[in-house]
Each structure stands twice: as C-alpha cells, then as structure tokens.
Image (cartoon, rainbow, N blue to C red):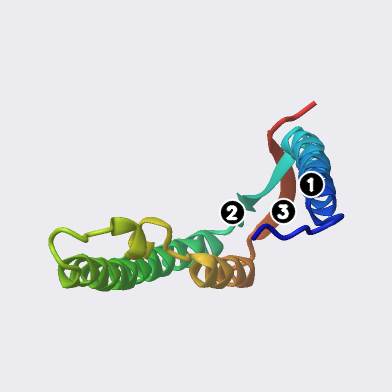
Amino acid sequence: MKRNFGWTPFLLGFEMRLQVQMVRFSMGILFSLGLTLGCAPVYQVKYDYLVPESAEGKGCTQQCESTKLQCDQTVNMQFEQERLKLQQGYQQCLLSQSGAARVPILCYDPSQSIKPDYSNCLATYKGCFERCGGRVEEKNVCVRNCR
C-alpha cells in the first residue's frame, strides 16, 4: 500500500534547496570576511630599553637583567614539566584505546599548542629597569601585511 504525501516531497525539496542556498551564502560571507581580515596589517608591541648613564644605574639594570634571566629559566622549567604531564596524559589516552579501534583523533595532545608565558617576567623587568633610572619606550611595529 503506497501512501500519498501530497505536497511533502515538493516541500522537502524546497527546504533542501533553501538550506543549500543558505550554506552557500554563509560560505561567501566567511570567505570575504577571511579575505578582509587576512589582508589587515598585524602589529606587535616592541620595547626599546634606554640604559641610564650613571654607573650605578647601569649596574642596577644588569641586576634586573640577571633577575629576568632567572625568571625566564623558572618559567621554562615549569612549562617543560607541564608539557610532559600533558604528553603523558595523551600517551595514556592512546594506550587506553583497544588495539584495533585506536583513533588518535579522540585523544587530543595539548602539549603541541601551549607556549611558555613570560609576561610576568617582562613586566617585572620593565618595572625594575625604570626604577634603576632607565627608560622603556613602547611602540607598535607592523610585522605582517604592512603597507
């Protein structure tokens, strides 16, 4: 026994065509937005450190430099420890999957996407440098898509 759905096949076809048009429209907008944003200049903050002229000021800024180096090394050690923990978790995820059904996509390796954060070291260094009588000049520099 065959049922007659009346307008249903026509409406389903219309809805499908409408969805395809909406997807095409959305893709067009995303493409043009990507072109616009992809061509925009990219700026990065750069710092110029002007060392004080006095011998006392120069010695003080050298102490700031060694403190910053120690801070950077501590950040590197902490980062490496965290990266290793994340990698171990990823390896455990891979090992927990059965042999034939192993799908690495289900196990995310975040250790590849993290970076050490030196922002506290830099902020402390800049403050120290200025307290020693030095000047820190901040400027925005175009690094990509410059005109």
Q: Considering only order in the chain, which callout, 1 or 2, is on the residue closer to the N terminus?
A: 1
Residue located 71% across and 41% down the image: 42
The residues tagged by marks 2 and 1 sit, at their Cα atoms, a distance apart of 73 Å
* For marks 2 and 3 on the same chain, the one whose residue lies earlier in the sequence: 2
Q: Is residue 28 above or below residue 58?
A: above
- Relative to 1, is 71 above or below? below
Q: Give the side of residue 64 with respect to residue 1, left or right.
A: left
How many other residues sit within 10 Å of disc 1, few (<14), some (14-19) or many (≥20)?
Answer: few
Q: Amino acid at mark 2?
A: Val
Q: Which mark is residue 107?
A: none
Query: Quarter holding the C terminus?
Result: top right
Image quadrant where one finds the N terminus: bottom right
Residue 127 x/y as whole percent: 61, 71
Is residue 117 visible in this depiction of the protein?
A: yes
Residue 46, how many percent across, how many down? Answer: 65, 48
**Cα distance, mark 2 to mark 3?**
15 Å
Residue 31: x and y in percent read: 75, 37
The front one of 79 and 98 is: 98
Q: Which residue is mark 2?
A: 51
Image marks 1 and 3: residues in contact by CB distance under 8 Å: no
Amino acid type at circle 1 is Gly
**Residue pictured at 77% horizontal, 48% vertical:** 16
Residue at image mark 1: 13
Badge 3 is on which residue? 138
Counting other residues with Cα less than 10 Å from the Cα at mark 3, is it few (<14), some (14-19), or many (20 or more)? few
